[in-house]
Image (spheres, rainbow, N blue to C red):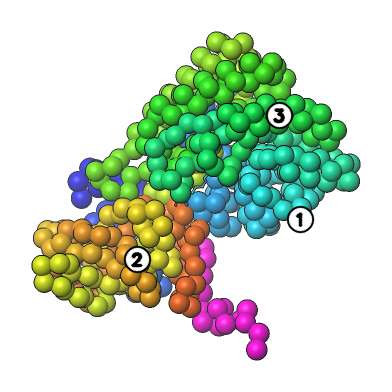
Amino acid sequence: MNNEQSQLFPIKTEINELDHLTIAGCDTNELVKEFGTPLYIYDKFTLTQMCKIFTNEFKSRYPNTEIVYASKAFSNLSIFKIIEQEGLGLDVVSGGELALAESINFPNNKIYFHGNNKTKRELKQALIYKVGKIVVDNFYELNLLNNLAKDLNIIQDITLRLSPGIDPHTHTHTTTGTLDSKFGFSLETGDAAKAFKYAKEMSNLQLTGIHFHLGSPIFELDPYALAIDKVLEFISNLGIDSQNLLEFSPGGGFAIGYIEKELPPPISGYADVITKALKEGCKKYGFDQPKLVIEPGRSIIGRSGIALYKTGAVKEIPNVRKYVSVDGGMGDNIRPALYDSKYHAVVANRMSETPKDLITIAGKFCESGDILIKDINMPIINADDTIAIPASGAYNSAMSSNYNMNPRPPILLVDEGKAKLIRRGETYEDLIQYDIL
Ligand code: LLP
């Protein structure tokens, strides 16, 4: 594995004497024998390292920073526990994610509740758990939340989600901060200005700052700097004082490497640009430096996860394409079908064989679009080989489905040569139990 490739895999990835892929000292082929395929493996060391890297890179430049894990990337009890132990906060976007956090008594004051259409029930749940901040997305929510808080006799801290009108140049499905977006109060339309006015008039809401999220994954640094300056200029023109700007969040969206040809800037690069833009902007527009809230999801959890599959059918269409099918696919990773996302793959049981066969790795789901990787050079694949796809830790399991009544795969956490089941695989009984005859 060359240096670029190794950046796609968990940090403690090695090849052992059997020519097998190992993660944190665990032979992936042994794990496959024990747990079957498809199988997802998360490396604890990579996860904790990413938490530490984010914390250090931001806090060394801007001490008053809080790193908040965007749990939509992968929500799991054991992962939430690690996130808590690493001192990170939690961004939740649903009552379900909040319930998971509540079940391990995740510190309420470190929870940020996001979403463009939080339901009455969800908002009540958040108020009762006394989450630190609710990030208000729209006028409907502003009124609803104020009334619910009034009923419960609570004064709730909120921040406003703004839509700054900056394009981060990523997939349209994952672009959020432009004018034509369902998220946030637009600067351009006048909504953001109105939102500040109304928020300050709400009896049971305390406006503590602002938030925006440009999209994800963002490989460029400039959009963050542009958006930070634009938003600070905007709120200074509105006459907002530092009292209502105790917190400032430019969201998440930091990219990870999926393929060796597209590696992201290091976290230090994002930290440099963001902290510099915030410091300079505050000086330029006369604000005290607020707390900086950073919300990485993918970049915290993505690299620690790999997906393992077994190969089965091979179909060769002369002069067209060779399809190699695996026993998972869009049910556990819909990203290629949804966003045309690119991935890398290796044969986990024959790691040092030279890639010389151009193939397309297809899934097993009844859908032509169920292709995991189009056109990748691999060693000649035999039936029952184990394929490993790195950078599978974010938004794979999180967006998984039971399409075609396929059970979701088990998930392991590996650390120092040991593997622990952190989510059991689903059974057919699990899938059938919700139906009523
Ligand atoms: N903060 C907010 C308000 C967000 O909406 C998101 C992601 C994040 C933080 C975290 O973004 P991250 O650091 O993970 O890039 N399913 C898509 C990604 C959707 C992201 C939604 N919001 C994918 O698989 O690429």
Q: Quadrant of residue 194?
A: top right
**Sooner in the amino-acid sequence: mark 3 or mark 1:** 1
Instruction: Tell me the magenta residue range.
Output: 417-437
Extreme-bottom residue of the structure: 437
Marks 3 and 2, how far apart at CA: 44 Å
Q: Which residue is mark 1?
A: 121
Q: Tell me the amino acid under the disc marked 3.
A: Lys
Q: In the image shown, does 353 or 398 lie closer to the viewer?
A: 398
Q: Which mark is residue 194?
A: 3
Please tell me whether mark 2 sits on a helix, a strand or a loop. Answer: loop
Mark 2 lies on residue: 369
Q: Percent position (x, y) of residue 69?
A: 55, 43
State if disc 2 and disc 3 touch (CB < 8 Å).
Answer: no
Q: Quadrant of the C terminus?
A: bottom right
Q: Residue 167's quadrant in the figure?
A: top left
Q: Is mark 1 within 8 Å of ligand 1?
A: no
Q: Residue at x 87, y 41 (%)?
A: 150
Between discs 3 and 2, the one toward the N terminus: 3
- Compare residues 241 and 415 and report the one nearer the observer: 241
Residue at the far front: name it.
189
Q: Is residue 156 left or right of residue 192?
A: right
Badge nearest the viewer, 3 or 1: 3
Residue at the image position 48 percent from the left and 20 percent from the top: 277
> Which structural element holds mark 3?
helix
Comes first in the chain, label 1 or label 2: 1
